[in-house]
Image (cartoon, rainbow, N blue to C red):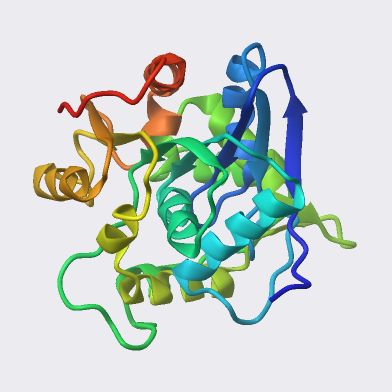
Amino acid sequence: MRDLRLHYLDFGGDGPPLLFLHATGFHAWVWAPYAEHFRATHRVLALDQRGHGESDKPPSGYRWEEFGADLMRFLDALTLDRVHVVGHSKGATAIAAAAAAGTERLARAVLIEPVLFAGPLASAPIRESPLAVGAGRRREVWPSRAAMFDSLRPRMPFETWQEEFVRCYVDHGVADRPDGQVVLRCPGAIEAEIYAHAPMTDGFALLERLHVPVLLIGGERSPGLGEREAAEALRRLPAGTLLTVPGAGHFVPMERPREVMEAIARFLAEPRAPTRRT
């Protein structure tokens, strides 16, 4: 879809470009605390992927390879080269998909809890999957941002997040309606489509195309990136390093931001490709 409009944030800063990609259902603003940390050393940007935030929400086009193609076209449109890129969950998988699509604009990549399916791939969207069904039933409207925050804060996954990330998600994850209420910027139907298409993509195969130094970050309690998946990911990556954050889960960048920021900073400051280690 060549006329797709993608919204992004440019937080400014000095140094090479550093681009952040969010997970399914979220938006660019969840990276604001990271932007504050990295603006001293990088020009920091964050992208609203298709269907999310203030970007276009087409009725179709939610194969995970499409998110990689979008990223490639985004980098081309802004003529960004030697980009350091950080992605969480689907955002991490999109980075590998962009490499598979042919982009040569990446310098280093940080993949936080990438979504990697093993076993036979689906030939069609699986709309009855638990994640897809749950997303389709997601509440979309609240009386106010304050009511939304109060509703979400004690619930998973938000109960384990640092509070500033919950506030970023709430403040910018909804739009104002004429009746005074607020509505999710990522509709549940679109989130459900993304989850339904996930089992159609071989994420492990995409990793093989990512020919730049990669830092793979996982949470010790992650349900999707356990020891076996992490080992297979490292085997597939041409130049991969693994960091496992103790006590953290899938939402490690929001749960343990200081540790993740420090790990990213160390990785980006390395003068050459890191040696493989676990």
Of 165 and 72, the residue lying toward us: 72
Where is 271 relative to 144, above or below? above
Can you name the residue that lies furthest to the left here? 228
Residue depicted at 40% across the width and 16% down the height: 270
Can you name the residue that lies furthest to the bottom here? 124
- x and y percent of residue 250 in the render? 32, 42
- x and y percent of residue 23 in the render? 48, 50
Can you name the residue that lies furthest to the right here? 178
Is residue 79 in view?
A: yes
- x and y percent of residue 130 in the render? 31, 71
Where is 79 relative to 244, above or below? below
**Quadrant of the snapshot with the N terminus:** bottom right
Of 172 and 27, the residue lying toward us: 27
Q: Is residue 12 left or right of residue 159?
A: right
Q: Is residue 182 left or right of residue 129?
A: right
Of 80 and 217, the residue lying toward us: 80
- x and y percent of residue 220 in the render? 19, 33
Residue depicted at 17% across the width and 78% down the height: 120
Residue depicted at 41% across the width and 53% down the height: 96
Q: In the picture, residue 195 is in which quadrant?
A: bottom left
**Quadrant of the snapshot with the C terminus:** top left
Where is 275 relative to 158, above or below? above
